[in-house]
Image (cartoon, grey):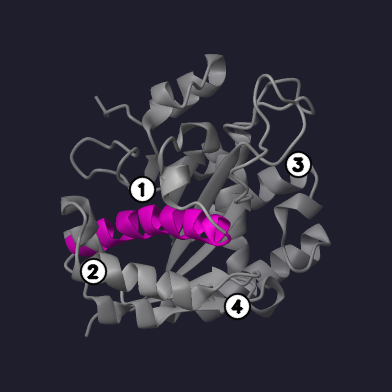
Amino acid sequence: MGTHFTLFIDESGDQDLDKFRTDERSHGSDPFLVFGAALVPTELLPAIRSELDSLAEKLKCDPLHCKEMSHLKTAYFARQASQLRIQLFGVVSKKATVGDYKSDIEGRKQAEDYYNKCASYLLERVGDFMKEHEYGPDQLSVIFEEKKHDYQRLRNFIHTIRKRPIDERANSMAKIDPLAIRAVKKGDDQALALADLTAFSLYQSVNESHSNFGHPEFRYMRELRSKFWKCSKTGKIANFGLKYISGPIKMALKGDTLDFALKMYEKKK
């Protein structure tokens, strides 16, 4: 059977598509929905959980949760995580760019469908990784951080994509078994902290808010950058381990935020 992996997934931001913050509107829900994931060889999970437990004790934050930590503690956590045998993945969606898709999913399940769509983009990235390394769907378990969400609806959505791919990219879903998807509360598995860290770090790298005076925090992503899956030939991270839905230009990222995002598209020299 070969190596078995466990994929831990968490999100940062929210799913509200109606009243989110923009340059013109300073109040409302988050302008981004970001997913982060950590892929861990299952046989290493006991050792990694033990390391995370020790880190939680040292940082006096159990379970590890970035929103409960200071900047320096989060930076330290990111540096320690970068030394673990993990592979990271992420997806960034800017709500202002969803366009007609919002009307396509209009209704009481809109927030859940938006969540599922973004989650599918993340799973697509992982599917491509599995395909490149010739791993099968039986070699992957998927764990989402549990929240108030209809996970059976998510499984059904993934199943539909696998059966009737909308485009060639969705063929990657053949590597994702919907029945392997489950949800676990953050406090019940310390390894979910790795997904929380990834989502939080990626969100902070695009978060231009009044509270940070329009200056996102790149430190955490700099610490984690080497752990994102990248093209083996070019070293490019974007469209491999990391996807900016619509791309940084159409997302209207600006200044240092745009410069940092574009670095994910750089090829090694």
Q: Quick check: 120 above or below 51?
A: above
Is disc 4 placed on a helix, strand or loop? Answer: strand
Q: Which residue is mark 2?
A: 162
Residue 19, image x, y percentages: 67, 38
Residue at image coords 46%, 32%? 97
Q: Disc 1 vs disc 4: which is toward the camera?
A: 4
Q: Quick check: 178 above or below 266?
A: below
Is disc 3 placed on a helix, strand or loop? Answer: helix
Real-space Cα distance between discs 2 and 3?
42 Å
Left or right of 229? Residue 49 is right
Which tag, 1 or 4, sits closer to the chain's start?
Answer: 4
Q: Which residue is mark 1?
A: 241
Main SS of the magenta part reads: helix
Real-space Cα distance between discs 4 and 2?
24 Å
Is residue 83 visible to the viewer in this orientation of the structure?
Answer: no
Q: Disc 4 vs disc 2: which is toward the camera?
A: 2
Which amino acid type is shown beneath numbered disc 1? Gly
Q: Which residue is mark 3?
A: 72
Tags 4 and 2 touching, CB below 8 Å: no
Q: Quick check: 221 above or below 81?
A: above
**Does residue 113 belong to the magenta stretch?**
yes
Q: Which residue is mark 4?
A: 184
Tags 2 and 3 touching, CB below 8 Å: no
Which tag, 4 or 3, sits closer to the chain's start?
Answer: 3
Q: Which mark is residue 2?
A: none
Real-space Cα distance between discs 1 and 4?
23 Å
Real-space Cα distance between discs 1 and 2?
20 Å
* Quarter of the figure with residue 132: bottom left
Tags 3 and 1 touching, CB below 8 Å: no
Which amino acid type is shown beneath numbered disc 3? Leu
